[in-house]
């Protein structure tokens, strides 16, 4: 049996108690005006499912991959959740905040690792350049012409003059 999710109305699946149904809401039929409402309802559905943090993160990641809201839409989602009273609204805000916090932490880790990699590459380049400069300096001390040094080391003339 084949189900074409885009032809299914997402509202028909809100009362399902299956994590897969929650994840697939973002692949179902909805209008542009329903995007923020869909996200709000998804968050409440996620809360109702009472999943462990790992599964919750997995489902949110899938959902957010297929329903990518703009910053304005994300802000509207937060405002809608804040308008609702009760402990459920507080718990949904907690889910949103923890998900954002995990995203920031992952971003920091990725940025840190990227920076380390760039630093290593820069260090290698500087090390090679330092070795080339040292060779050029010795060549100059041994009486080689600037032109000869430039041809062999690929350093520029002004750099050779500074040695």
Image: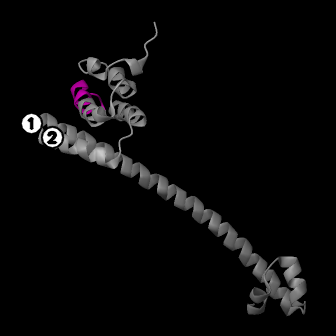
Depth order, front residue of 139/61: 61
Is residue 50 toward the left or the right of residue 159 in the image?
left
User: Which SS class for mark 1?
Assistant: loop
Is residue 109 toward the left or the right of residue 149 in the image?
left
If the image is split into quadrants, where does the C terminus sit? bottom right
Extreme residue toward the left, this view: 86
Say whether residue 17 is visible. no
**Horizontal and vertical percent for residue 122?**
63, 68
Q: Tell me what residue is drawn at x 32 percent, y 25 percent.
A: 22
Q: Is residue 49 magenta?
A: yes
Q: Is residue 4 magenta?
A: no
When asked about the image quadrant of residue 59, the answer is top left
Is residue 147 toward the left or the right of residue 54 in the image?
right
**Horizontal and vertical percent for residue 86?**
9, 36
Rendered view: 98 above or below 132: above
When asked about the image quadrant of residue 26, the answer is top left
**Horizontal and vertical percent for residue 139?**
86, 86
Q: Tell me what residue is drawn at x 52 percent, y 56 percent.
A: 113
The residue stretch that appears in magenta: 43-52
Depth order, front residue of 73/126: 73
Tags 2 and 1 in contact by the CB under 8 Å rule? yes
Per the image, the residue denoted by label 2 is 90
Per the image, the residue denoted by label 1 is 86
Depth order, front residue of 40/105: 40
If the image is split into quadrants, where does the N terminus sit? top left
Q: What distance separates the C-alpha of mark 2 from that of mark 1?
A: 7 Å
Rendered view: 35 above or below 126: above
Rendered view: 15 above or below 33: above
User: Which SS class for mark 2?
Assistant: helix
Rendered view: 99 above or below 38: below
**Magenta-drawn stretch, dominant element (helix, strand or loop):** helix
Say whether residue 130 is visible. yes
């Amino acid at each position: 049996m084949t189900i074409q999710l885009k032809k299914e109305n997402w509202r028909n699946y809100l009362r399902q108690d299956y994590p897969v149904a929650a994840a697939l809401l973002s692949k179902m039929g909805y209008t542009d005006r329903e995007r923020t409402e869909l996200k709000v309802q998804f968050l409440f559905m996620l809360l109702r499912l009472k999943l462990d943090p790992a599964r919750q993160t997995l489902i949110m990641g899938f959902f957010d991959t297929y329903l990518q809201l703009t910053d304005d839409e994300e802000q509207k989602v937060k405002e809608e959740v804040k308008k609702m009273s009760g402990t459920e609204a507080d718990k949904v805000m907690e889910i949103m905040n923890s998900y954002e916090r995990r995203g920031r932490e992952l971003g920091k880790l990725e940025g840190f690792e990227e920076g380390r990699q760039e630093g290593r590459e820069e260090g290698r380049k500087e090390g090679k350049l330092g070795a080339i400069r040292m060779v050029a300096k010795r060549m100059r001390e041994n009486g080689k012409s600037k032109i000869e040094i430039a041809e062999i080391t690929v350093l520029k003339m002004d750099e050779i003059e500074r040695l």
